[in-house]
Amino acid sequence: MSKKKQEKVKHSGPERSVVTTNRKARHDYEILDTFEAGMVLSGTEVKALRQGRGNIVDAYAEIRNGEARVHNFHIPEYDYGTWTNHPPRRIRKLLLHRSEIDKLAPKLDEAGLTLVPLSVYFQNGYAKMELGLGRGRKNYDKRQAIAKRESDREIERAIGRANKRGGS
């Protein structure tokens, strides 16, 4: 009996709908590790995010006094909100496990490492933020990364053309 119930419970994984991403972060930073954090939000903030509004381009996260917080995360006011609307750029608390905070705190004290928001999404009804532990890239590093990406893309195109012709 219990085996049948276990077979019915199987599903393909968590449903994830992305609200916003920070594409510039992967260009400006070398991402060493990623973390998933929940966010403490008010009702109108959640409703505005569900409308697909939010901007994390200028956002950054920090750990202070054992708490993770995100700064400059812009969630515009909810269109149908009243006097209970939220301030668009308030400091928001992030929900991380104590072990993750203890792991991150000494790394952030290290020179050159920072906690960068990569994306905001809803997973199983909860608003989540993907954070990346990153080291800032210099301009020449950015140029090298672009050159490598373009050369890899050209190699893939050449392989695709060769496979399309039927030869190797």
Image (tube, grey):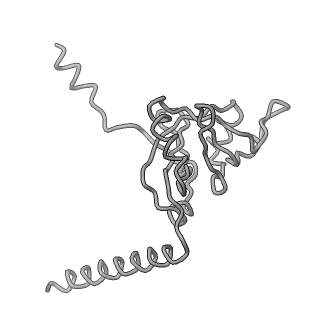
Residue 58, quarter of the rendered image: bottom right
Residue at 83 percent of width and 33 percent of height:
82
Number of on-image labels: 0
Give the residue furthest to the top. 1
x then y, percent, for residue 22: 57, 57
x then y, percent, for residue 140: 51, 78
Residue 138, quarter of the rendered image: bottom right
Residue at 51 percent of width and 33 percent of height:
96
x then y, percent, for residue 44: 71, 34
Could you say which is closer to the camera, residue 60 or residue 15? 60
Q: Is residue 83 above or below residue 73?
A: above
Could you say which is closer to the camera, residue 47 or residue 62? 62
Residue at 74 percent of width and 40 percent of height:
90
Q: Is residue 53 above or below residue 66?
A: below
Q: Quarter of the image for the N terminus: give it.
A: top left
Residue at 74 percent of width and 46 percent of height:
76
Direction from residue 154 to residue 161 in the image, left or right? left
Q: Quarter of the image for the C terminus: give it.
A: bottom left
Give the residue furthest to the right. 83
Direction from residue 67 to residue 42 in the image, left or right? right
Could you say which is closer to the camera, residue 129 or residue 161? 129
Give the residue furthest to the left. 167
Residue 151, quarter of the rendered image: bottom left
Q: Is residue 146 above or below residue 110?
A: below
x then y, percent, for residue 73: 67, 47
